[in-house]
Image (tube, coloured by chain):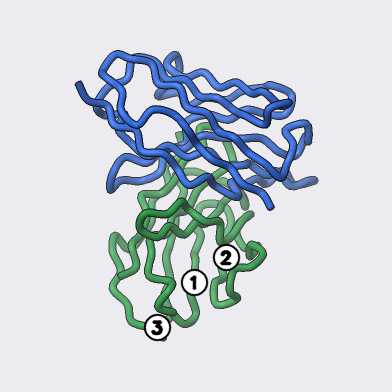
Chain colours: A green, B blue
Amino acid sequence: DIQMTQSPSSLSASVGDRVTITCRASQSISRYLNWYQQKPGQAPKLLIYAAFSLQSGVPSRFSASGSGTDFTLTISSLQPEDFATYYCQQSYTFPWTFGQGIKVE
Amino acid sequence: QITLKESGPTLVKPTQTLTLTCTFSGFSLNNNSLSVGWIRQPPGKALEWLALIYWNDDKRYSPSLMGRLTITKNSSKNQVVLTMTNMDPVDTATYYCARRVRRFPDHTNWFDPWGQGTLVTVSS
């Protein structure tokens, strides 16, 4: 299985901060990497697909980059509604796997 | 509007079989760029992909749960059903279904949207 490791393990930030979350795959996954946001008691929501494509309706303060094994999700200016847990997910090969999640608090 | 909703028991006993139904609207599983998957999340833990069913009835399962999972679809009813046998307390989780979208020609794919999830507790 491809292991997805996110860092940092936890993240404390303030409104207006620039926040960067990293996701590393245990082997190359090209651009088959997606990012999801999950708020407490809610289902995950797609933010970014195919490594850097912004899902429709997602604010432009969210951006992402990377390919191969190393990927980043950036929030340019953290807003109150962005406090949530963020997951990366590889869809390069089965079984599809998720990172452990990073809670932004 | 695309929606998915999970339904099934909230409590099952150890060794029992769990049957969950995902009822969706706003898309068709007759579309070869779409499929439906199941993902679960134990309380306070990360997401775990379980199974996927394609438009042509092809199926994929998590190897760690292979043998316990069966995914089926009824395209005319817009439903996908997941069964999991021999339930154990460690299977206590919120179970989500989600539409899987595949983009051509690069075949990248993702889950969007997700159902609201259903919490299943395994306890005697």
Mark 2 vs 1: CB contact within 8 A: yes
Question: How busy is the neighbourhood of tag 3: few (under 14 within 10 Å), some, or many (20 plus)?
Answer: few
Element class at badge 2: strand
Residue at the image position 45 percent from the left and 22 percent from the top = B19
- Look at label 1 and name its amino acid: Thr
Element class at badge 1: strand
Does A76 appear above or below A8? below
Element class at badge 3: loop
Mark 1 vs 3: CB contact within 8 A: no
**Disc 2 or 1, which lies upstream in sequence?**
2
**Disc 3 or 2, which lies upstream in sequence?**
3
Point out which mark residue A65 bears. Answer: 2
- Look at label 3 and name its amino acid: Asp
Point out which mark residue A17 bears. Answer: 3
Mark 3 vs 2: CB contact within 8 A: no
Of residue A65 and residue B44, the one placed in the foreground of this image is B44
Q: Residue furthest bottom?
A: A16
A58 vs A15, left or right, is: right
**Disc 1 or 3, which lies upstream in sequence?**
3
A102 vs B76, left or right, is: left
Report which residue position mark 1 lands on: A74
- Look at label 2 and name its amino acid: Ser
Q: State the image coordinates of residue A8 (x, y, percent, origin top left).
A: 32, 63
Q: CA distance from mark 3 to mark 2?
A: 19 Å
Q: CA distance from mark 1 to mark 3?
A: 10 Å
Q: State the image coordinates of residue A62 (x, y, percent, origin top left).
A: 54, 72
